[in-house]
Amino acid sequence: MYYSLLSSSICIPLAVSLQPKTTWTSTKFNNEKKVGSCTGVPRNFNMEKLQSGYLFPEIGMRESEHTQKYPHARLIRLGIGDTTEPIPDIITSAMAERVYALSTVKGYRGYGAEQGNMELRMAIAETFYRDLGVKGNEVFVSDGAQCDISRLQAYIDCGVIVGRAGNFQEKTGTYDNIVYMKCGPENNFFPDLSTTSRTDIIFFCSPNNPTGYAASRQQLQQLVDFAKANGSMIIYDSAYAAYVTDDSPRSIFEIPGAKEVAIEISSFSKFAGFTGVRLGWTVVPEELLYSNGFPVMKDYNRIVCTCFNGASSVAQAGGLACLSKEGYRALTTVVDYYMGNAEILFDAFSSLGLKAYGGKNAPYVWVHFPGMSSWDVFNEILEKTHIVTIPGRGFGPGGEGYVRVSGFGHRERILEASMRLKNLYK
Amino acid sequence: MYYSLLSSSICIPLAVSLQPKTTWTSTKFNNEKKVGSCTGVPRNFNMEKLQSGYLFPEIGMRESEHTQKYPHARLIRLGIGDTTEPIPDIITSAMAERVYALSTVKGYRGYGAEQGNMELRMAIAETFYRDLGVKGNEVFVSDGAQCDISRLQAYIDCGVIVGRAGNFQEKTGTYDNIVYMKCGPENNFFPDLSTTSRTDIIFFCSPNNPTGYAASRQQLQQLVDFAKANGSMIIYDSAYAAYVTDDSPRSIFEIPGAKEVAIEISSFSKFAGFTGVRLGWTVVPEELLYSNGFPVMKDYNRIVCTCFNGASSVAQAGGLACLSKEGYRALTTVVDYYMGNAEILFDAFSSLGLKAYGGKNAPYVWVHFPGMSSWDVFNEILEKTHIVTIPGRGFGPGGEGYVRVSGFGHRERILEASMRLKNLYK
């Protein structure tokens, strides 16, 4: 499932709708454990509309209940969206070198450019966007904050917090000002754009989390054409681009005309095991313009310089090493390892006669249990195999009936999980 | 000068005013070098209201003009707000150890807690807030993004971007919705609160950048009482707390009652030379409540978890080493070194018969040139001594007539600068 917002709203208020749809107000909060006197500052009322964020605590709770019930069971967590394998030496050596240099008069460096070291920006442009015309000054290095597994969910929450998402409808599980583009096998994981409403911003993640599906060149061309026809802006999340194994585009900028309608956000997190190191990047093309002709890049640059002080210099040194010939080759081996895991899990579910998706261009396998509640499936798998998955419903209403498992993990655990899964219905 | 916002607004939309004062709209932009077709997404009109950000580019321009004019002059930059001395070995060794562990199966770690490692949060509470009742769960580790020298300026800009600052008035150099609290020697660097309007949020930085003045216990008690009487929230910036040498409070929480009205933002940047490493923290006390009784901490926590993915694990390992007995002692030596520099510069300006402030509880010296334009002073000093300062006007209208110099720099350069300055009027 992809999301798009009726009115544009990004965590960083890059662009805003013509007329705010909500008014800010304060409600009475019944604080029984009130520990002090109140200030007169009203709470951001939109915080109360936040719905997500319960998913992982809920999974954690069920996990610990399970562990109490079966204290000797060896739990395997396939829900994990976090990298597990060591970072190649060549990359950590480069980081350590930078760290040690900080203790020398000659090597000490303080503040760097807010946009990132130009050497790294150039290397990103050269490595990931060769022949696509992306220049170093269009690459903004980030601390990868927007590169987590819950990115799309996070985007929605950011929209909620600033009051652009509108009200939440319990019945449908949706926000009023968000257009949900349901994607599944029935539409080849791509929305029917002929029936999709026009929005300012379209969030699109490919290879997708949680479905593991990578959009085809033809589908992305449709998306770009749609955005162009509607004057929309695409925020394209390519955090899993390194996992693409076929000829699906690894960047939205492989599509002609995309530079006039899209921003691309990507990350070293899943590509290089940098989830804890924190490093990512965003490409804002010079050609992308607001309705009045002003370049989005100029405002983006200004906002980065105002609200951000650059990614850690140590992480950036590591990033540069990732893009060296040797570093890149070493990382490819790690990516292949995770993809091997995903294949094992894909095959395990398939062997049960279930329809599994993904696992070919992304480390996620998305398994369909037709007609079942995804929380029920989660419970059944946990009870019978001591394996933790993620119920698809946790990713939004379109995920009902699915669970997600990931290829992140040590191989022997994945093989053990596969064995248990194959016996699920025995 | 301190600032306060009529309606509350933080970069992260923690709290918002009851009624937005501005409407979002789009204007025609005359883009002569238009490189592509426009999207239909309106620009955030508030971006046009941003005023600051020209300061450092302007200084850079004058610097390079000067260098062209005097190609053989040895320029000394005293404008610098960035640390220059090596980080003690014990700290970089701890970072390197964490980095190398990332290349091992056993030592690899991915995502950490968004709020920071609990060990570090506890160590921050224990080191900086012993006996002040701050608990580890009230400490939120950050990447220090809000800890730069332009923090107050940045705060204003964030307010501008989200449209809470109101319009900019060229004549006064101020924004309509911001109450400016002018502070100088005439009021002992503390605003007359009896004539200050009530605001939701009060930004207060002590030890102060640029004036170098640390508020006294009595002054801070007045501030807390003022906030309490008005139901305001104080955002207290204590990034330079490590530089306090007398008994001025190093934290707002030294003041009784402060936990009910204040958030404190601080940083490893200036304390540990981490400006490039990126690490800071924010204390949000449990006792701080919105007008409806809801704890600010809960929303802050939610926002951190939504919009941030934690500081780099490598930086956090370094932070923990900073707070070890040995690390802390080593850092004290570095802080003393910078303060020695500040004293040298303080004395140099004083020897000219000028009135200098600061330099005792902060690495900044704030020099008064009565009746002069601070840009003229900047030019004169540059022309005659090849020394770059910062014109006080760049920090806001209250800085006119002043220049700021900093104690960051290598000792031999500071001594050379001192010699040149002493000859300024000869």
Image (cartoon, coloured by chain):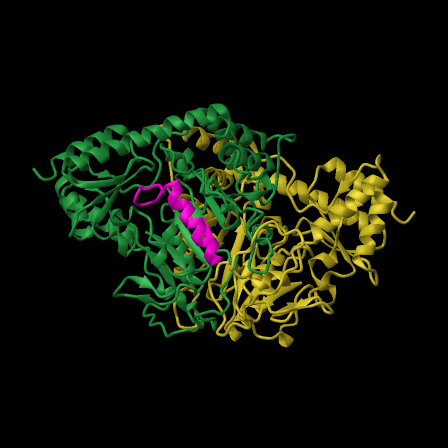
Chain colours: A yellow, B green
Out of B224 and A384, give the one closest to the viewer. Answer: B224
Residue A15 falls left or right of residue A275:
left
Q: Position of residue A196 (x, y in %)?
A: 62, 74
Q: Report which quarter residue B421 is drawn in.
A: top left
Residue B361 falls left or right of residue B296:
left
Q: What's the residue at 50%, 60% (across, down)? A: A263
Classify the position of the C terminus of chain B by image quarter: top left
Compared to residue A239, the image places residue B218 above or below, namely above
Q: What's the residue at 54%, 47% (across, down)? A: B284
Q: Position of residue A340 (x, y in %)?
A: 70, 43
Out of B394 and A259, give the one closest to the viewer. Answer: B394
Q: Is residue B214 magenta?
A: yes
Q: Is residue A104 visible?
A: no
Q: What's the residue at 26%, 32% (across, down)? A: B343
Q: Is residue B276 visible?
A: yes
Q: Is residue B42 magenta?
A: no
Residue A334 falls left or right of residue B283:
right
Q: Position of residue B13 (x, y in %)?
A: 51, 58
Q: Position of residue B382 (x, y in %)?
A: 17, 44
Q: Report which quarter residue B381 is drawn in.
A: top left
Q: Which residues are magenta?
A: B207-235
* Residue projecting furthest to the left: B426
Q: What's the residue at 54%, 27% (across, down)? A: B97
Compared to residue A104, the image places residue A295 above or below, namely below
Count of numbered badges drawn on the protein: 0
Q: Report which quarter residue A411 is drawn in.
A: top right
